[in-house]
Amino acid sequence: MPIFVDRRLNPKDKSLGNRQRFLKRAREELKRSIRDRIRTGKIADVDSEHAVSMPARGTAEPSFSDAKDSGKRQHILPGNKHFAPGDRVPKPGQGGGGSSPGKTVSEDDFRFVLSREEVLDLFFEDLELPDMVKLNLKEILAFKPRRAGFAATGSPTNINVGRTMRNSHGRRIALRRPKQEELDAIAEQLAILEAEPQSAGPVRQRIAALREELERLERRRKRIAYVDPVDIRFNRFDAQPVPNANAVMFCLMDVSGSMGEREKDLAKRFFVLLHLFLKRRYDRTEIVFIRHTHEAQEVDEETFFYNTQSGGTVVSTALEEMRRIIEQRYPSNEWNIYAAQASDGDNFVTDSERCIGLMDGQIMRLCQYFAYVEIIDERESHIFGSTDNGTSLWRAYSAVNQRWPNFQMSRIANASDIYPVFRQLFARQPVFQKSA
Amino acid sequence: MANQTGKSGQTSKSGQTSKSGQTSKSGLLFSGSDWDFKTLSRAYQAIEALAIEELHLDVYPVQMEIISSQQMLDAYSSVGMPLMYRHWSFGKHFLYQELLYRKGGRGLAYELVINSNPCIVYLMEENTMALQALVTAHAALGHNHFFKNNHLFRQWTDASAILGYLDFAKGYIARCEERHGVAAVEAILDAAHALMEQGVFRYRRPPKLSSERQREGVRERLEYEERSYNDLWRTLPPSKDGTKANETVTGIAERKKTLNLPEENLLYFLEKNSLVLEPWQREIIRIVRVVAQYFYPQRQTQVMNEGCATFVHYTLMNMLFDRGLINEGAMLEILRNHSNVIFQPGFDDPRFSGINPYALGLDMMQDIQRISTEPTAEDRDWFPDIAGNGNWRETLLDAWANHRDESFIRQYLSPALMRKWRFFILADAASEPHYEVASIHNERGYEKIRAGLAQSYDIGASRPDIQVVDVDLLGDRQLRLEHKVKNGIMLEEASRDATLRHIRTLWGYEVSLAAIDAQTGGTLNERSTSQIGE
């Protein structure tokens, strides 16, 4: 009779530890692979699983093995059809003993799937928003009550009944408070004795003694309270500071006619990347989409990316709108405010001055970070690549850039530029942190 | 019988009770594809009774464990053991197996069997009842009998101690990771894994697995020895001609003798003699060595082990069917799976990936059955001692007990089978641009094919032969290894260098590997870690 053991309900993922060890080992290589993928592929897919190839370095398992291209050997094979001794068979390709091993996938050359969490972990590993640490330390604003044992004083709503009754019970035992049953027993005895018609002397004595005893017990019961104020315990709460973990991200985009599909697509990728990043860093992130032509309005995501609107380009309207929304909904002492603006750089000449004023005056003070990306034509990229010459908005923002360390600006010409720019914008900047 | 079962299939609408009533009347072990523990147990008992009665098998008690496909994958990646220490390479193997499975490139095994006492058999929950019966016969009886009776397993592995040992190993390595860090443990495991092939005793019987208490004692003693004496710390100044004397032939011979050189088990040598390893590192090497040694017999008996199990399940299932214990539907399913398992494509088939051990093993064993019952004149010529002895059971039991793949093929591969398989030998010289057909299945080729095939299953001969030959503990402490080059087959250079680096990690000083031609004794080349760099 065999023993049966049903293992199906045993904990699954017995090999999870091994997988983690493996990923850790292959980390560098996997990171490179993910980075390449994100550079070329769709950004919207970042937040999902990825198939990656087996990293070659660091995961090889060497052992002494025979070189295929040396010496003499024999292969004993089944299925001879027409060979006779002495026949010669050309070797397939350059593979040496290629006919004997089948063409199966080698164990060191295959692709496997990383989960979404693993991808993001690799992707964001060495990115960090500037000022993050400082911010978290500085802005301890909210407090959350947290249980911290029991107290002898407190408000009635916080009475801990279990604790209180436990104390009361202990005290009652210690002081030997008469129980109701004892009183009842004496009273019953008394009733029986009293019910008897004529009572003899000893019986009367007994009755008197019982009455006295009953009275004594009742007195004692009154003196020793069932629940005494000293029994009462309250739940104690400590106010624990919680770091401000809210972030709001403003996406500002020019949607006038000069922004085509390509420009919008690039801008979108940048926003998605920024959003992903914030989502990882903060408990709660909100996004506000502000689009503008010659007037600005807050819209939902769908409209932001896919609706077109005709009109001129007045950038300051968007900044104005952003300032208004911050004032209304996102007080800067409660929210970490990030802003990303994408534009092709067109603006009314007179408006650029106004933009500088707005930025210097209020917005840069409110924002943790303001990133401006200018989407330029691929043909222009080599012209504008390095110089500070450029569109009117670029020149205006250059002035802002010099004054504010938390302002960053970059030009993007095609999809493969975004990721390097993103890294450059958010790469750790120890020097900058000091100066700020 | 056939009519009856057919009828029961048609009338099964009347409900479960009547159906089961009918099956028990008709004597079927089960009908339908669902299984439960009662049916499994009934099937096991019937099959075991048959096996003992008809095939005279002798088995360990059985523990059957039902697992899901996920758990089967888990078991795959930890070299098929229910317990294993943690290492990244198992994670890598898991990803690979999972990929093959997900893509449908490979089905999972229906079962997995552990050479332990009691014999643990894993059954997949997805299997139908017919498959469970097949698996029971295959693993719980076939493999089980082989594990219990084959001389290699009896002598070289300790079925009752392995699970306890692995439990210890897992815990020990986890504790080391806590104490010394994952990276430090990983470095030792990486290096030790690279030498697994060279970490077994091929000719000398390995010491028995000791109990936890004994191990503790040995460890303490080792630590004590390490503290108290080491040849390196000899403080007497060497006499002027003393160093010279060491260089003499007798000095070297003496040195080799004290270190038991040459030594084929590199892991053993490093564990015992390395000058840089801490006790816990030695223990880890020992664990890897024990695991390698445990699997060594399995690798030498692939054809026989699978052949035995396949022969047993095929024979038993047919017996069950003949006695009306399983119906035609189940038998068809069993045969379909059976023929999938023993499928052997020819060498030119795109599906060809070497010789299928199930197919070769089964064919050889059925051939032995044929030779002992209805031999031809040729068989009487080739196998005078078993041809026509009429007692195929004993002949097979004897073969299962006393052979490994290499000797089994050398002894029992018949010309008839070589013709059936149409075996031929392809000579492959790296210097030539073509292969040459050396022998085919004809009168002149039989012996050669048989010897060649047997040779290819000789693990000892087909793995690179690398031994520790010398080390001068008082001098530069360079560890000298020797690779006996047979037929001019050299080592693959990239992996050789990487492996040498691993050896240096464990040894602590330079390591050199000389390639020595096995025939002439001349040195072909020499590679030292000082040439390799990090």
Image (cartoon, coloured by chain):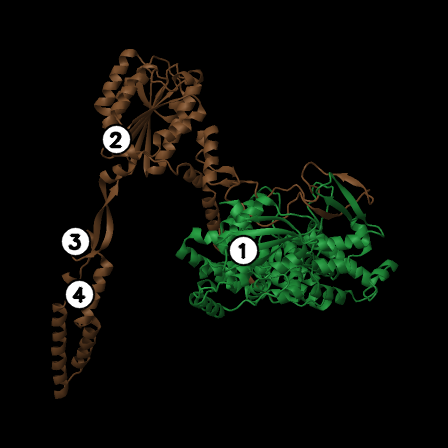
Chain colours: A brown, B green
Nearer the observer, disc 3 or disc 1? Answer: 1
How far apart marks 4 and 1 lie (CA) works out to: 85 Å
Instruction: Please tell me how crowded label 2 is: few (under 14), some (14-19), or many (20+) other residues with Cα within 10 Å.
Output: some
How far apart marks 2 and 4 lie (CA) works out to: 54 Å
Whether discs 4 and 3 lie on one chain: the answer is yes
Residue B31 is situated, as x and y percent measured from the top left of the image, at 66, 56
Q: Amino acid at mark 1?
A: Leu
Nearer the observer, disc 2 or disc 3? Answer: 2
Residue A226 numbered tag: 4
Residue hosting label 1: B479
Q: Amino acid at mark 4?
A: Tyr
Residue A154 numbered tag: 3
Residue A16 is situated, as x and y percent measured from the top left of the image, at 47, 49
The local secondary structure at tag 4 comes to loop
Whether discs 3 and 1 lie on one chain: the answer is no
Q: Amino acid at mark 2?
A: Tyr
Q: Amino acid at mark 3?
A: Gly
Judge from the rendering whether residue B187 lies leftward or rightward of residue A402; answer left or right: right
Nearer the observer, disc 4 or disc 3? Answer: 3
Q: Residue drawn 65% across and 64% down?
A: B152
Q: What chain is tagged by disc 3?
A: A
Residue B520 numbered tag: none
First in sequence: mark 4 vs mark 3 = 3
Q: Nearer the viewer, residue B99 or B220?
A: B220
Q: What chain is tagged by disc 2?
A: A
Whether discs 4 and 1 lie on one chain: the answer is no
